[in-house]
Amino acid sequence: MITYECRSLRTLADEERWPDLLGLYRESRAVGAELRGEAQGAAETAPLGHLIAYGAPPELAARLFDPDGGPGATATTADHDSGPLWEVLATRHTWRRLAPLLGPEPVRRLVRHTRALLGEQLGPGGEPDPEGVPLTPEPWELAAGQPDALVREYLPAGGARRTLLTLPAGLEGLGPVELPERGDQVLGLAATRLLAAAVPWARARCVRGTGPAAAAQLTSLRRVTGGHLAFGAVYPALVQAASERPWQGCAEGRLAVWRILAAMTGGSVLSVAEVNALVSRLRCFTWHEPTDELRFLHLALEDPATGLSWVLSGSRHEA
């Protein structure tokens, strides 16, 4: 357990005593993991991990994830303070600097995708993604603005800032819509399971019918304020909803959305061409609920080629 006050730790950081801080991190995390379990050990050392990931030279910061520290001393993809430590690291250094330093493949993968979202050109011939998700964002991923806006902006001493995205983002462009009868629910599809897992505070369904018919499955209203949007306009809210928990990074949200889209194509493996074709034909319906306050997402994705629509709806009232 860390016994120093945060003030003392920041002093060591200001003095750039990074080897001392890394040693303290490893010792504290290992002891915490042994005495109180992995999750508690990680939580206790998270503020110190943030200081190192944010401020240390990449050669030392990358060693947070190096297993040479011994049992319980190594940060994993789940270690987080205001955000995952690997994402803090990825916002501070280029992939060119980090690539020779990072060992564990799960960390490497998430850092690669984060650097791509931050606009770094990783170039041809790099490490391919194991699921086939492209490292260069597709044009529809850029339609609503730069994807780097989805990544948290981390602060030196801890904490982060992030744009709060909701869907619908406002009532402009929406109008009164009379919802039809509920579409027949379709059970057992992988895309529905993936939607529910990605945004656990929302309900997910698949129906045979239009987007508004799918929306009728998850709202008690028969007349709503709603409308259709291009997929590129709803994509940022989906990515953020799938990565809003503090142990998740934007790269994980993007990967989750690609898995969902790949499942909607019905293919056994991800095909970028098929996902792009799906996105080009999707009809996205969103609507407003009177109880919406802070965080909410109301979205139906209709695929005219199959006659299926997936709907996701929920809200969170806590900050």
Image: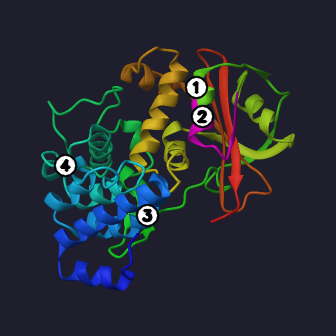
Q: Earlier in the sequence, mark 2 or mark 3?
A: 3
Residue 42 visible in this rendered orientation of the protein: no
Residue underneath mark 2: 195
Q: Is residue 45 left or right of residue 171?
A: left
Q: CA–CA distance between discs 2 and 3?
A: 26 Å
138 vs 97, nearest the viewer: 97
First in sequence, mark 4 or 1: give its number: 4
The N terminus, quarter of image: bottom left
1 and 2 marks in contact (CB < 8 Å): yes
Q: What separation in Å lies between label 3 and label 4 (alpha carbons)?
A: 22 Å
Please name the residue shown 65% across and 55% down the image. Answer: 172
| SS at badge 1 | helix
Was residue 139 drawn as part of the magenta stretch in this picture? Answer: no
Residue 308 location (% of width, % of height): 66, 20
Circle nearer the viewer, 3 or 1 = 3
Callout 2: SS: helix
- The residue depicted at 58 percent of the width and 22 percent of the height is 190
Where residue 126 appears, as percent x and y from the top left, is 17, 33
| Up/down of 42 relative to 132, above or below | below
The x and y percentages for residue 304 are 61, 19
Residue under numbered circle 4: 95
> Badges 4 and 1: C-beta atoms under 8 Å apart?
no
- Relative to residue 251, is residue 42 depicted above or below? below
Q: Type of residue at label 4?
A: Trp
Q: Secondary structure at mark 4?
A: helix
> In the picture, which quadrant includes the C terminus?
bottom right
The amino acid sitting under disc 1 is Ala
- Vertically, is 285 above or below 307? below
Q: In 3D space, how far apart are the residues under numbered discs 4 and 2 (Cα atoms)?
A: 30 Å
On the image, the x and y values in percent for residue 87 come to 34, 55
Magenta residues span 194-205
Find disc 1 in the rendering and name its residue: 191
